[in-house]
Amino acid sequence: MTDDADTEDFSKFGFEQLRIEIEATVNKLEQEDLELEQAVETYGRGVELLKFAQERLLEAEQKVELLQIGSTQESSDEINPN
């Protein structure tokens, strides 16, 4: 499993799918008796999923901030048209 393949696959996931995959990964690590190599691979996949989820959250936060700035600017323009 390469990072490029993981990145390509994970980039297709929406935030909700990432959340589901992260939850399944955590459950697998907690509930299954994995060989060390399998546990490390599963953990690594979880870390990559988490990175993508954090990126998606950051993107959403930035979009909301832009919308708020635009909304604030429009409100200001309506109050003080110059």
Image (cartoon, rainbow, N blue to C red):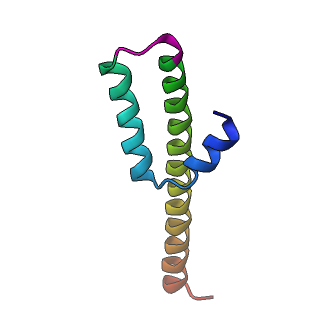
Instruction: Compare residues 16 and 73 and report the one nearer the observer.
Output: 16
Percent of width and height locating residue 30: 33, 20
Residue 39, position in %: x, y?
47, 18
The prevailing secondary structure element of the residues shown in magenta is: loop
Which residue occupies 51% across, 68% down?
Answer: 67
Q: Could you say which is closer to the camera, residue 61 or residue 47? A: 47
Residue at horizontal 50 percent and vertical 36 percent from the top: 50
Q: Is residue 31 left or right of residue 1?
A: left
Q: Answer above or below: position of 14 versus 1.
A: below
In the picture shown, does residue 61 fall above or below 27? Answer: below
Q: Residue at x 55, y 74 (%)?
A: 73
Q: Is residue 79 above or below residue 15?
A: below
| Quadrant of the snapshot with the N terminus | top right
Quarter holding residue 21? top left
Q: In the figure, is residue 49 to the left or right of 1?
A: left
The range drawn in magenta is 33-37
Q: Position of residue 15 (x, y in %)?
A: 44, 52
Q: Which quadrant: the C terminus? A: bottom right
Where residue 34 sits: x, y (%)?
41, 16
Residue nearest the observer in this picture, 43 or 5 = 5
At horizontal 58% and vertical 48% (from top left) the residue drawn is 9
Q: Quadrant of residue 4?
A: top right
Camera-nearest residue between 74 and 24 = 24
Total numbered labels = 0
